[in-house]
Amino acid sequence: MKKNIAVAGNIGSGKSLLIDFLCSAYPLARLQKEEDLNPYLKDFYADMESWSFKSQIFILTQKFCHIQKAATTFRSVIQNRTIHEDAEIFSRNLFQCGLMNEVDFKTYYDLYLAISSVLPAPDLLIYLHSSVNACLKRIKNQPDYFPGRINSNYLRQINRLYVNWIADYNLSEVIIIDTDQFNFAANFVDRADILEAIERLI
């Protein structure tokens, strides 16, 4: 039976590593990361207040299109971050930090509510919790890393919003993995434990 698996978590929490592993273990179609396609990303990092709304609307639109397209395929899919995280974590953080004004946030959030109401929920959400220090370490090892783009205060704010969000999340089954403790990139025992947990739920 076709399944939709979503991997959630902060920047640098290990989502791409886990998705790589799961795609090697199961015949999953990987949905493309919207951030990789975002034409506003460079401008957004240079001036977040001016570009936050356009950037988030682009990501929201692309995610909607990707999930709709995935619903028409016969393969199980895996996605890097849900549409709900874009709204409840990242856009909300921009608003709370004064980088998206109230009118723009309300416009964005109303559109998110309309879109999410017609999209299917994932069958399984895997939430990767990671400390700020561990996230920073992984970010510095990424090929597109450059100093100053993401700092510890930003990651700490995102972590706080994630903790609140996952506590209330009830749209699907959830697996929570502490990536400070689990090394699914290299530890075969940890990999086996993760696969066992997934297979119990799907």
Image: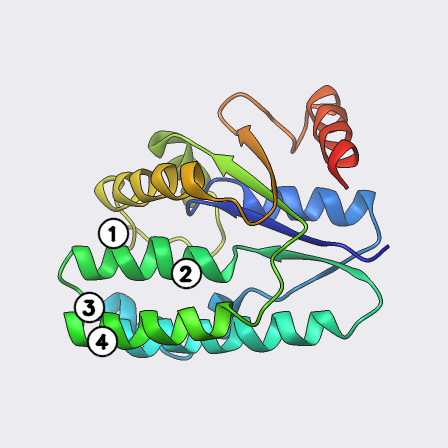
Residue 148 coordinates in the image, percent (x, y) = 25, 52
Residue type, numbered disc 4: Asp
Q: How crowded is mark 1: few (under 14 residues within 10 Å), some or many (20 or more)?
A: few
Look at 52% across and 55% down and name the residue there.
Answer: 81
* For marks 1 and 4 on the same chain, the one whose residue lies earlier in the sequence: 4
Dot 2 lies on which element? helix
Q: Mark 4 points at which residue?
A: 104
Identify the image quadrant of the N terminus. Answer: bottom right
Residue type, numbered disc 2: Asp
Q: Mark 3 points at which residue?
A: 100
Residue 110 coordinates in the image, percent (x, y) = 34, 73
Residue type, numbered disc 1: Gly
Dot 3 lies on which element? loop
Question: Pointer 1 and pointer 4: residues touching (CB < 8 Å)?
Answer: no
Q: Mark 1 points at which residue?
A: 148
Mark 1 vs mark 3, foreground winner is 3
Q: In this view, does 13 lie to the left or right of 202?
A: left
Identify the image quadrant of the C terminus. Answer: top right
Q: How far apart are marks 1 and 2 (CA)?
A: 22 Å
Q: Name the residue under label 2.
A: 86
Dot 4 lies on which element? helix
Q: Residues within 10 Å of mark 4 (few under 14, many from 20)?
A: some
Question: Pointer 1 and pointer 2: residues touching (CB < 8 Å)?
Answer: no
Question: Pointer 3 and pointer 4: residues touching (CB < 8 Å)?
Answer: yes
Q: In this view, does 53 lie to the left or right of 13?
A: left
* For marks 1 and 3 on the same chain, the one whose residue lies earlier in the sequence: 3
Q: In this view, does 9 lie to the left or right of 25?
A: left
